[in-house]
Image (tube, coloured by chain):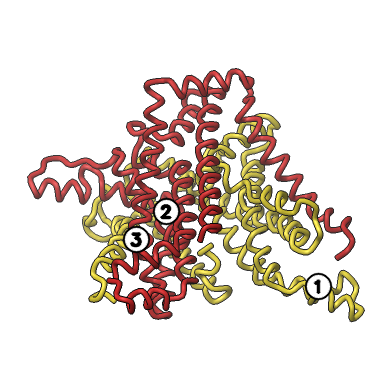
Amino acid sequence: MTRRGPMLALLVPGLAVLVLAFLYPVAATLLAPPDGDPATVARETGALLSDPYLLPVIARTIRVAVLTTAICLLLGFPVAYLISRAPARWAGRLLALAVFPLMLNTVVRTYGWIVVLGGNGLVGQVGAALGLGRVQLLYTETAIVLGLVQLFLPLMILSAYSSLAQQDPRLEEAARGLGASPGRAFRQVVFPLALPGALVGCTLVFAGAVTAFTTPQLLGGSRERLLSTLLYSRVNVSLDWPAASAVALVMTVLVLAVSALSGRLGKIGSTTS
Amino acid sequence: MILRRPLLSLLTAIAFVLMLGPVAILIGVAFTAGSTLAFPPEGLSLRWFAAALEYRPFIDAFGTSVLVALVSTALALALGVPATLALQRGRIPGRRVVENLFFTPIIVPELVLGLALFQQVMVGLQITALGTLVIGHTVLLLPYTVRVVGASLALADPRLEEAARGLGAGPVRTFLRVTLPVMAPGIASATILAFITSLNNVPLSLLLTGPGVATLPVEMLNYVQSSFDPVVAAVSVVLLVLSVAVAFATERLAGFTKVFGR
């Protein structure tokens, strides 16, 4: 493998497609869309960041993503832990069951919530039976968070599991043997050692929640707009390219910033431990 | 386990109900005899499956989805396998930077990539929706093929190839008899993963539609927003059954959680 030429030639087609069909179009759209130039996009972005109607959309997007991430960690980490300590046969089945939803498209996965959360749905029926009146969770922030938690739990479980499965179970046993309660062994040994996996999971879930479209569109509608659904309506309804670019820019920067931050945290974590 | 760790078991139960409950309810809705999205279903019937099979846009969209998934998976492999071979085996200057470049399509929001391709390629270059879908999905799948095939190459000892060369095999023969078999499981996994990823995509495909051209998930999403009958529930059950079949086939072929658990 001393000849560099042929090896470089193998890279060229892939790199060409990346540059021509990905980097260039994305950069052009973010910075200089058809009806605008960088100045217009900058102005639109400024408007987005100061408009009293649009600022809440950004705040809501971040709030929904943070809540989704927190709930996924709270539920997904224990599941991953249970799978990592279960007998091999059960572990395989549970893991497969947790992974399976990833094979279904987001419409299939989200649609059921409309039946559950709608005014005449299960929640509505239970509410009426309890005399709570008409309970309507559909088209609320709660609905979006529920839908996103469902969507991204598998990612958290997988990420946490990959860390937990590598952990030597004897470490936890040693902590228990030295007198720690199960809860304390979990908090002081199991969780800190699995932090890298949990961090990867949190990053994936947060980025996924910020960019998800189907779920906020179906469960939040036009009443509870997030950045993604706002972007879509600016393209499809108002046909305002620079304004759409501004939303795309904010969304991209948000995701890149969180990825970079988690990369930094991961590095710090791995050098100190 | 359940008795010793009640809290852990409770959280696990909640997680699985959240992940699978809505899908289970959808199955119930699909078999309803009534004409609204109701659970429990109002009587049993297969009428919504019949309605789904007669609804032309879904049939066309399924064809579009499969076509796009097949072509873009093939293209992503054709571009990604040589690239990962070069990254893993060649002494590429700035290897890490190039490798990260191949992974960037994962970080950029798909909706943004879709908007970019819509503006610059579909409107800008007047390429058809189908062509733009293939381009977009190829870009989307490229990181998967590079990473999955790369992982199988990274596990194999490069000295195997050096030994084959040392024993007198030419570069082509070495590639066909040593490198390719080493990559084969990775290529199989990447193919399944890429195909399913393309088939399920919504955000990237959302804006890349034309007259009579849309992928199935996008067509389903549009239908759900305008009509409230259970046709899409029936389509979902059909997709669910197909997914279960693919899952079992994958399990036999390469290990289900190994392929989809990445």
Q: Which chain is yellow?
A: B
Q: Vertical placement of A177 versus B41: above or below?
A: below
Residues behind callouts 2 and 1 on a single chain: no
Residue B7 visible at all: yes
User: Which of the 4 image quadrants contains residue A195?
Assistant: bottom left
Q: The N terminus of chain B is located in which quarter? A: bottom left
Please state the chain letter of the residue tagged with numbered disc 3 in the rendered image: B
Q: Amino acid at mark 3?
A: Leu
Badge 1 crowding class, 10 Å Cα cut-off, few under 14, some 14 to 19, many 20 or more, is: few
The secondary element bearing badge 2 is classed as helix
Please state the chain letter of the residue tagged with numbered disc 2 in the rendered image: A
Badge 2 crowding class, 10 Å Cα cut-off, few under 14, some 14 to 19, many 20 or more, is: many
Badge 3 crowding class, 10 Å Cα cut-off, few under 14, some 14 to 19, many 20 or more, is: some
Q: Vertical placement of A215 versus A97: above or below?
A: above
Q: The C terminus of chain B is located in which quarter? A: bottom right
Q: Say whether residue A239 is left or right of residue B102.
A: left
Residue A252's spot in the image, x, y percent? 54, 37
User: Which of the 4 image quadrants contains residue B185?
Assistant: bottom right
Residue A81's spot in the image, x, y percent? 38, 68
Q: Which residue shows up at 37% across the image and 28% down it?
A: A56
Q: Earlier in the sequence, mark 1 or mark 3?
A: 3
Residue A257's spot in the image, x, y percent? 53, 40
